[in-house]
Image: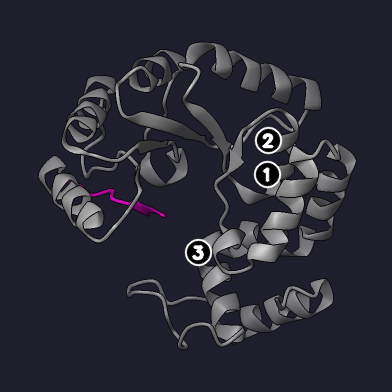
Amino acid sequence: MFVGIGALRTSHVLHHADDAQAAGARGLLLAPVSYQALTRDDVYGLFETVVQRSDVPVIVYDNPITTRFTFDDDLYSAIAGLDGIASVKIPGVPTDEAAARQRVAKLRGLFPAHVTIGVSGDPLAAAGLNAGCDAWYSVVGGTLPATALGLTRAALEGDASGALRRSAELQPLWDCFADYGSLRVMAAIAEHLGLVSQRSLPLPILGLDSAQRARLEVAVARLSLVE
């Protein structure tokens, strides 16, 4: 199990890293977030500090929509070379199959052999896995593991068309992600399935309203997502 430890200050990140490891985390997922826009040196220094403090592997979480920071390939390469970095969670791949394979191959050449490449952005999971990514850092997987596992196994077993077909079947869910945000959607699904209490998201995030929930529940029922 890995735990996300992002925070606005390095001191808080280190506190979260210590707390997560004490609780039994086997890895740490770190996104570079800050109130003030970060520089490349800021981000490198953050990861350098955390891997020096951590006794477990660290995953680089590149999420420019959330962090407002964009990694370039030189920074990827520099951070991946730090002792303790285990994986890089990239923010998707190009939709064109050849371009996606080229992108993953380029990253593979920048990273040490032990550093894995994980795709994120669930609608791009099949494309990323088919292009050679080692893993899918999934949003749906935590709540609907069988759904995520079926798509992943298809891709990793070489059934590229099967993985793409499974992803296409989930398009109503991906559309809800695009319209409402994956966090709100998955929280609503977890609530709908009785896995968590209603209004489970921390304020100020209000979650989906009744009309949005009705649309999502239709998609859940049609896609047979109950596991």
Which secondary structure class fits the magenta region best?
A: loop
Q: Position of residue 146 (x, y in %)?
A: 69, 64
Instruction: Quickly name the residue at label 3.
Output: 183
User: As shown in the figure, which amino acid type bears the numbered disc 3?
Assistant: Leu
Query: Mark 1 Cα within 10 Å, few/some/many (few <14, many 20+)?
Result: many
Camera-side residue of 29 and 189: 29
Q: Is residue 9 above or below residue 43?
A: below
Which mark is nearer the camera, 3 or 2? 2
| Secondary element at tag 2 | helix
**Mark 1 vs mark 3: which is more N-terminal?**
1
Q: CA distance from mark 3 to mark 2?
A: 21 Å
Q: Residue at x 70, y 81 (%)?
A: 217
Camera-side residue of 172 and 125: 125
Instruction: Quickly name the residue at label 2.
Output: 128
| Secondary element at tag 1 | helix
Residue 7 shown in magenta? yes
Circles 1 and 2 in contact, beta carbons < 8 Å: yes
Looking at the image, residue 16 sits to the left or right of residue 78; the answer is left
Q: Position of residue 124 (x, y in %)?
A: 68, 42
Q: Position of residue 167 (x, y in %)?
A: 78, 52
Query: Mark 2 Cα within 10 Å, few/some/many (few <14, many 20+)?
Result: many
Looking at the image, residue 42 sits to the left or right of residue 26; the answer is left
Instruction: Quickly name the residue at label 1.
Output: 125
| Secondary element at tag 3 | helix
Span of residues in magenta: 1-8
- The quadrant in which the N terminus is found is bottom left
User: As shown in the figure, which amino acid type bears the numbered disc 1?
Assistant: Ala
Image quarter of residue 158: top right
**Mark 3 vs mark 2: which is more N-terminal?**
2
User: As shown in the figure, which amino acid type bears the numbered disc 2?
Assistant: Gly
Q: CA distance from mark 1 to mark 3?
A: 17 Å
